Amino acid sequence: MIDLLSLPSADEWWRLVIVVPAVMAMILAGEGARVAFRLPSEFTRKFVHISVGLLIFCAPWIFTSAIPALVLAALFVVMNAVAVNLGLFKSMHGTSRITYGTVYYPLAFLILILLFWRTAPMILALSMLVLALADAAAAIVGETHRHPITYRLSSDKKSLQGSVTYAVTAFVVLTIGLAWYPSELRLPLPEAALIAFVAAAFGTGWEALSSRGLDNLTVPLSTALVLSCYLVPSLGCDPRQFTAGAGLALIVAAGSLKARFLAPSGSVATFLLAVVVFGLGGWKYSVPILTFFVLSSLLSKTGKAKKRASSDLHEKGSTRDYAQVFANGGIPGMLVLASAVVPAVEWYPVYLGAVAAVTADTWGTVIGMMSRGRTVLITTLRPVVRGSNGGVSLRGLLGAAAGSSLIGLSALAWVSSAATVAIVALAGVIGSIVDSVAGATVQGHYRCTVCSKLTEKRLHCNAATEHAGGMRWISNDVVNWVCAASGALAASLLL
């Protein structure tokens, strides 16, 4: 964290007075070029993107105190937010889609100042430089290539040529920076290249998956995360373990895509989460989540004939996309990161509770849908169609308990007692029950205007459905986030 007692000198305040008009001049120059030469706003936006990024790269040399840099970042967060909403300075943010990328840009700078200004300014500078150069190069190549190979992982369309350009540019920038940046953290060229490769791969995944300008936040923060794992000893990360974890994450993601456990977006999301879990957590954290992922994926592929009857009730199938991966693994991933940042807290049982909850939910759902027994709504105990949101059955509850218990047993080598295993199993079941209650009450559900069935889908029988209950913005993915958080909270309270 920064030392707020390090107050800026009068000279630094004057430098801030000079820097702010300099940034505004770059923005006005881009706007002037766009109007005078009738250039596409996307192209001139990248001029501003790169020039401002190069200026930010020099910030640790311009200011000694972090306070002027924080003021600069906060000022442009506010100014850019106002400009986006008023439609000003299209050379900065005049894209064909609604985006707050110009707000995320200084916000990323502000966050990195708070984290690294005093301890590792090299990480701050290089992370922002990757955003300025690699992200801009990817956009320029993708938009100017005559025959781009396009793909869509989230709401934005990306190009393969742009993604490759990002990866190569990020690798080159980071290799040069890590080997020649004037800092005590400077590395030998082979080691710099290895770290740059891991960071470039991790950042490429985030750039490909991010949409609506969010890559201006995810790219620098993900780059900084990888660099800090190698360069900040206080984080307690084993560099060899992190490198091996990144390799294992790539194998798991690629294998799952080939086995059709995951959609392409789900494969990328799995790689990003697995790098954090495997790289920071080691086998202790990896074994339980691998147990969940592999066995739950296999279970979800069984009984297809029986599940087909209820498949039209659910928005998504058993091949998980990125939203489903993050819904199930987001809370566990954040808990692994928390264990690295705050090692004094015992995070492991809480992590197990989150994993046990999503396992219990998955097993209970799949086994319940294959059951021939009676299914009732958890809030009223009235019979419902098998597979309905909030529906529970005896076999489904037993399946949830079995899945949750298996997660506790998978961690037996790292927990203190059998009682902890039992608590984890109970926390998982509690999480799955919370999931069912949320599915029955607040999750949005819709009625088909053709066949009158209740469903999660907005389109059914080739016709738009009508809202029948719950909150529109609460999807099954949101409920799964609640499930994982409930399991983590239950484990924490029970322990």
Image (cartoon, grey):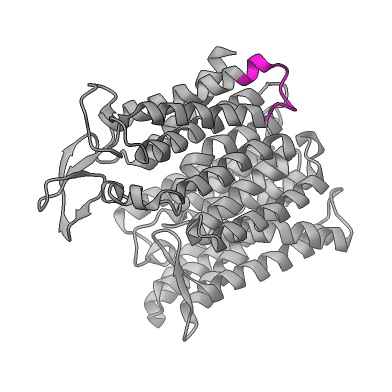
Q: Position of residue 463 (x, y in %)?
A: 15, 58
Name which residue lies at 80% across and 60% down.
194
Q: Quadrant of the C terminus?
A: top right
Work out whether residue 283 or residue 229 is closer to the camera in this orientation and state it. Answer: 283
Q: Quadrant of residue 151?
A: bottom left
The reply, left or right, for residue 450 in relation to residue 198 is left
Name which residue lies at 70% across and 33% down.
340
234 is within the stretch colored magenta: no
Name which residue lies at 73% across and 18% down.
416
* Residue farthest toward the bottom in the current orientation of the protein: 146
- Main SS, magenta region, reads loop
Q: Position of residue 442 (x, y in %)?
A: 27, 31
The reply, left or right, for residue 29 in relation to residue 382 is right
| Magenta stretch in the rendered image | 411-421
The answer to whether residue 22 shows anywhere in this view is no
The reply, left or right, for residue 316 in relation to residue 257 is left
Q: Quadrant of residue 319?
A: bottom left
Q: Position of residue 285 (x, y in %)?
A: 68, 36
Q: Quadrant of the N terminus?
A: top right
* Residue farthest toward the front in the current orientation of the protein: 372
Q: Position of residue 262 (x, y in %)?
A: 50, 56
Name which residue lies at 54% across and 14% down.
493
The answer to whether residue 299 shows anywhere in this view is yes
Is 194 located above or below residue 346 in the figure?
A: below
